[in-house]
Image (cartoon, rainbow, N blue to C red):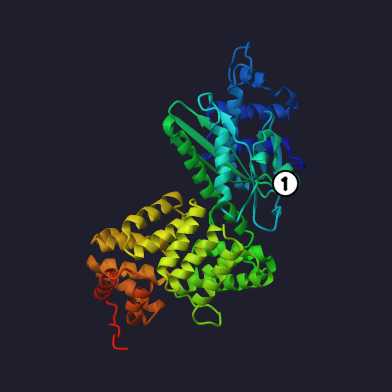
């Protein structure tokens, strides 16, 4: 974290410049490295008033003394690139630097800020408040004069689909970026995060650079560059596609914003952090489906919905916890031995309170599916997808449901799109891809997907490995997977047929999986049809 009013020494500034220039993560050109050294030395010498476009152009870039900054924008363009290089450095090697060097917008004189040892609190205790500032336009955009403004609007629209955020609208975000700084956003707008950046158009491509900044401190949280080929006939669709990808990266339950806020909740009891902290802890759990976390998450969310019964997001998250307890066979401390009824009641109430929430519809979809109504489950999941097509969790789980039913043309594109957009999501959704390959006799591909599930406390990853390995004659791997199944559920062989049928697995898939598990060494008991 940084605080501007703290004084820093000349020696400390020069040491930081040396660290920056020596870092492999500082990707500036040689010209911009000289740019940085020049403006820093001028500022240390007390000559900040001389740091102008003209002096930089003539003394650093070797421009003719007749240089006119009104006609040649080289300094402004290179300053933008230098700012981005510095931002990336402070996201990587510079995260632990004792001070920070920035080139504030609106000028070229550097700012030196010393690091604090303690984190500043977020501006708001509830759902994060996000301000999307107007992106800067770099290069000649006369052929597409509304591109940058349109991108900003598209990003705002994409972010508002994530109902767990509070997004400032266009009338605020389309102010010139020089008018907005982190301190002002914190004081005037109570924003937790700023989303800023710039677009660049070239004859054959366009590029969007995005930076997420914590408003309380100016700390750079996340940065990324998105590049696409420039196809004039498709430029609007491509612009919107990049805006959607940015929104996903920022706003997913395990995206940049929630991950940053969840770090504050780690290791602390949910009841001491309040209702929103319980939701944050849920999102930390949802990234891994860690069985060791589920009971603490459930208890924290139960406290939250008891204290705030109209908190729809908490209701939806708690419903998903109960659905997970059933689908992954994870024991919880709830008095009702069947968590499905509680999951359904919570999800129905969440939708009543927030009918436009994609997450509430998602919770309802899973609750209905596991309650035995596959058609109603798919209907709710599709409704959630329509409300927020950028939510890769919904895409992945909807694809998973279609895969269970053997509807491959619908399943596979959804799951593949979800992982292409968000490779960091849980590997459990790859069970759908395992089923796809296994059903078509592609056992090597099925085993490859099964190995990528990487969820040792979830039974079904081991089921997938055991079945595929057995078909390939990999007896040792199949045997190890069966041992893992028995360790998690010693009686699974007697329940496997009923379990797969209860999960709506396509009727022609059930005997294939069961036969493969028997070949792997699992003692499968045929169900009693007489009762």
Q: Residue furthest top?
A: 66
Residue 437, given in percent of the width and then of the height, sits at 28, 60
Q: Residue at x 26, y 73 (%)?
A: 511
Q: Residue at x 22, y 67 (%)?
A: 473
Front-most of residues 4 and 400: 400
Q: Quadrant of residue 197?
A: top right
Q: Residue at x 74, y 40 (%)?
A: 8
> On the rendered structure, is 270 left or right of 324?
right
Residue 5, given in percent of the width and then of the height, sits at 77, 42
Q: Residue furthest bottom?
A: 531
Residue 298, given in percent of the width and then of the height, sits at 57, 72
438 shown above or below 232: below
Q: Quadrant of residue 92?
A: top right
Q: Residue at x 47, y 27 (%)?
A: 202
> On the rendered structure, is 109 left or right of 301?
right
| Residue 354, visible in the rendered structure | yes
Q: Residues within 10 Å of mark 1 (few under 14, many from 20)?
A: some
> On the rendered structure, is 386 left or right of 513?
right
516 shown above or below 526: above
Residue highlighted by disc 1:
189
80 shown above or below 114: above
Residue 46, given in percent of the width and then of the height, sits at 76, 27
Front-most of residues 294 and 151: 151
């Amino acid at each position: 974290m940084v605080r501007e009013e703290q004084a820093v020494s000349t020696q400390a500034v020069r040491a930081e410049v040396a660290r920056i220039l020596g870092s492999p993560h500082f990707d500036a050109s040689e010209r911009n490295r000289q740019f940085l050294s020049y403006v820093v030395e001028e500022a240390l010498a007390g000559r900040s008033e001389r740091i102008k476009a003209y002096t930089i152009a003539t003394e650093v870039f070797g421009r003719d003394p007749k240089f006119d900054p009104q006609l040649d924008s080289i300094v402004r363009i290179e300053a933008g690139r230098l700012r981005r290089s510095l931002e990336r450095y402070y996201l990587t090697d510079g995260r632990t630097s004792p001070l920070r060097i920035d080139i504030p917008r609106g000028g070229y004189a550097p700012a030196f800020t010393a690091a604090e040892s303690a984190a500043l609190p977020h501006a708001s205790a509830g759902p994060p408040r996000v301000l999307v500032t107007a992106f800067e336009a770099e290069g000649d955009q006369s052929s597409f004069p509304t591109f940058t403004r349109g991108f900003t609007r598209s990003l705002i629209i994409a972010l508002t689909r994530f109902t767990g955020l509070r997004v400032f609208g266009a009338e605020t975000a389309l102010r010139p970026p020089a008018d907005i700084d982190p301190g002002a956003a914190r004081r005037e707008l109570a924003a937790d995060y700023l989303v800023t950046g710039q677009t660049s158009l070239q004859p054959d491509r366009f590029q969007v650079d995005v930076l997420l900044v914590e408003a309380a401190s100016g700390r750079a949280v996340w940065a990324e560059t998105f590049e696409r080929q420039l196809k004039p006939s498709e430029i609007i669709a491509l612009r919107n596609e990049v805006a959607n990808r940015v929104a996903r990266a920022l706003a997913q339950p395990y995206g940049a914003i929630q991950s940053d806020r969840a770090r504050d909740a780690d290791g602390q009891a949910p009841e001491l952090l309040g209702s929103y902290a319980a939701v944050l802890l849920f999102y930390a759990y949802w990234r891994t489906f860690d069985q060791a976390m589920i009971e603490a998450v459930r208890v924290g969310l139960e406290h939250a919905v008891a204290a705030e019964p109209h908190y729809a997001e908490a209701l939806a998250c708690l419903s998903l916890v109960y659905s997970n307890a059933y689908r992954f066979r994870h024991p919880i401390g709830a008095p009702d031995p069947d968590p499905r009824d509680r999951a359904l009641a919570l999800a129905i109430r969440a939708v009543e309170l927030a009918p436009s929430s994609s997450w509430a519809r998602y919770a309802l979809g899973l609750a209905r599916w596991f309650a035995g109504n596959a058609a109603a489950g798919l209907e709710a999941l599709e409704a959630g997808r329509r409300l927020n097509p950028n939510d890769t969790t919904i895409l992945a789980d909807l694809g998973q449901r279609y895969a269970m039913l053997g509807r491959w043309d619908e399943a596979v594109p959804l799951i593949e799109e979800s992982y292409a957009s968000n490779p960091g999501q849980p590997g459990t959704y790859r069970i759908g891809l395992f089923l796809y390959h296994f059903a078509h006799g592609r056992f090597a591909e099925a085993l490859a997907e099964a190995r990528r599930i990487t969820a040792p406390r979830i039974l079904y990853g081991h089921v997938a490995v055991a079945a595929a390995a057995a078909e390939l004659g990999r007896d040792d791997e199949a045997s190890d997977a069966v041992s893992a199944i028995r360790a998690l559920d010693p009686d699974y062989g007697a329940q496997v047929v009923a379990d797969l049928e209860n999960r709506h697995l396509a009727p022609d898939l059930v005997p294939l999986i069961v036969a493969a598990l028997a070949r792997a060494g699992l003692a499968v008991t045929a169900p009693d049809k007489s009762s």
